[in-house]
Amino acid sequence: MDAQEAVRLVLLYLHLIGFALLLGGFAVQYFAGRYRINAAILWGSLIQLVTGIGLAAPLRDGNEPDPAKLVVKLILALLIAGAVVPMRRRESVNRGHFLAIGAMTLLNAGVAVFWT
Ligand code: HEM
């Protein structure tokens, strides 16, 4: 394995940890019925932005993902972070706002997997 591939795999690994934090944090609050932005959601949304932008670099020797896919993922990730960061100190947010965060997270994972 060359150094570039190692960088890509480390970024992908961190990207999956960010996804686990974001969706896991969302699930905990959803099942508790308390629509609060917890630390896992906050850090998960930021990790996804940073690691996703890193993964969007041309690291696959020409076999790169469709740029349109990356733009869609970036827009969704910015919308998620925009819905998360300003609300991080609130006791709770309204149900629609909270569900939109989870829905956009699942949508972005779907884009990652099904848009080949
Ligand atoms: C909340 C935001 C995000 C979520 C939930 C998410 C989810 C995922 C998941 C689950 C994978 C693994 C798919 C696989 O291994 O087949 C993945 C891979 C990837 N993601 Fe994200 N992602 C997010 C944000 C971003 C952003 C902002 C970018 C860059 C603009 C990005 C670019 C990528 C790339 C390049 C891959 C590697 C797989 C590929 O598309 O070829 N992601 N993402």
Image: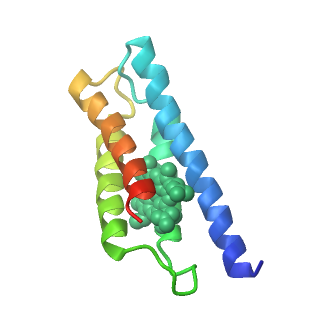
- Residue at x 38% of width, y 41% of height: 106
Question: Front-most of 91 and 27?
Answer: 27
- Residue at x 60% of width, y 60% of height: 12
Find residue 107 and report its horizontal and vertical position in percent: 34, 46
- Residue at x 49% of width, y 22% of height: 28
Find residue 22 and report its horizontal and vertical position in percent: 48, 39
State which quarter of the image contains the N terminus.
Answer: bottom right
Find residue 102 and report its horizontal and vertical position in percent: 36, 35
Using residue 52 as the reference point, say whether residue 99 is left or right of it: left
Find residue 49 and report its horizontal and vertical position in percent: 44, 57
Query: Which image quarter: residue 116?
Result: bottom left
Q: How has the structure been colored for display?
A: rainbow
Question: Front-most of 36 and 30?
Answer: 30
Q: Is residue 1 above or below residue 26?
A: below
Tally of numbered tags = 0
Whether residue 30 can be seen here: yes
